[in-house]
Every structure is written in structure tokens, then in C-alpha cells.
Amino acid sequence: MCTDWRGRKGLTMLVLFGDSFISESSYIKLPPTDSDIFPDASEHLTWFKMLSDDLGTEYKTYGKPGTSFEYSTLKFFEYLSSDEYNPTDRIVFTLTTSERSPVIAKEFLPEWAYLANYKAYPELLDKQRKQQMEKHTDPDEHYTMFKQFYRDWFVLKNHDLVVAQRYMLLQTLHSLPNKTASISVSSAESSIAKFFPNHAKFSLWQISTEEISDGDMWDMAKKQGA
């Protein structure tokens, strides 16, 4: 079961960091319209719930849909530097793509990070995707105010620095006394994964694509522009 930290008293837990791939809200709290499209999704048993059951322990996830690598890293280091950290915890870190907004600010919801490239370059979107993005109006004030920043950031972003930041995160994670694992959402870590035996040899996007394409969900996803 998922739990908070109250009354933990040294209990070993499965602790997860990342985006929607380890977020309960992506599976359990779907809007009614999404539940109608994917009728089984509201009752979907998450992979990390099954993992915690196999381990015989409770779990705590810091994942939120649409969040950035920077947000997950911040949550990870807040956990490490707090009384909540337990050297017997099992820790899983999923590394999301680097195209999401790196901004961490009080007025910026972490879930808005995935919209960065869509809001910075709306002229590049096809009609269907543009209509989908227009429904997300809450972040518009931020992305309008800092549109030039994001356009410059995408142009000037240094891929080697992105890889270096991920290397340092993985080095810290896998140097802990805990049992640890890391999983890429895409193939961004392919050049450094070889240095970390506990880094998965597959990507979560690969697994998701195979699961969706192996059944009726593929047709439903295409209808929704996924």
C-alpha cells in the first residue's frame, strides 16, 4: 500500500522518483472522460504497486505527471537530506526526457513542465496537437511571459551537460548503501548506462509502446492523438 511517513519508525519502504510512470494520479485519478475512453484505467494496478507487493513492503512515490528531471532530482535530494531517509529503503529513480521546463518556482506547477516545447513553438504543432494544447490554459501566463527564454533555451541547450547531470545523479543514487535501480523513460542515458549495472537495459517508453500496441488500446490511443 502507499503510505506517508508518519509512524514509519525505521520501516523499510520502496521509494520512487520520476514523472507519470511512477505517479498514482496517472492511473487512479483519471478524469471521467479518460475513464470512459480507457474503462480499465481507473482500476489499473501500477507496476510499482506490484513491485512493492513482491518485496513485501509499503511504497512512497514522489512522482507527478509531466514533471521534469530537475523536479525529480530536487525531490530526491530533499528526501536524502531529511529524517525520512532510511539506508534500508529500496529506491527507484525514473529519468524523464530533457525537453521539459527546468523551472522550479512557487508560481510554476511542476506538472506544467512537459508543455515547454509545445508552448514555446506552437507554430510547429499539427492541428490536432494544437487543439489539445489550447485546452491547457493555466500555464499560459508563465509560458507567454517567458516564451523567449524557452525558445533560447531549446536552441542553446547543451546535450553534453544534460548527460553529465544525469551521470552525477546516477552516481549519487547508485553509491548509496540502499538497494537502488534507475530506469530511463527514453534512450537519453544510453551513453552512460553502461557505467551503472543497476540501470535498466530497457526504457519505459519502449515498454509502454509494446503494451499499448499489443491490443485495442492502440486504436484508442491513436484516436486521442497519443
Image (cartoon, helix red, strand yellow):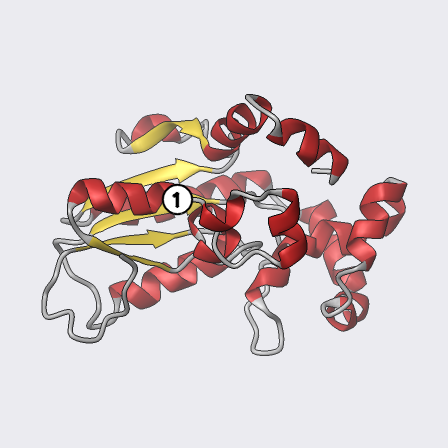
Q: Is residue 78 left or right of residue 25?
A: left
> Label 1: which residue?
45
User: How many marks do you count on the picture?
Assistant: 1
- Above or below for 5 versus 148: below
Classify mark 1: residues with Cα within 10 Å, few (<14), some (14-19) or many (20+).
few
Answer left or right for 65 relative to 88: right
Q: Residue at x 45, y 48 (%)?
A: 43
Residue 201, position in %: x, y? 37, 25
The N terminus sits in image quarter: bottom left
Mark 1: secondary structure: loop
Q: Residue at x 23, y 71 (%)?
A: 5
Image coordinates of residue 20 in percent, x first then y, are 50, 50
Q: Is residue 125 visible?
A: no
Q: Residue at x 29, y 65 (%)?
A: 79
Viewer-proximal residue among 150 and 127: 127
Give the x, y percent position of residue 61.
35, 57
**In this image, 135 relative to 53: left or right?**
right
The furthest residue to the bottom = 106
Residue 59 is situated, as x and y percent measured from the top left of the image, at: 26, 55
Residue type at numbered disc 1: Leu
User: At x 39% / y 44%, what residue is drawn?
Assistant: 45
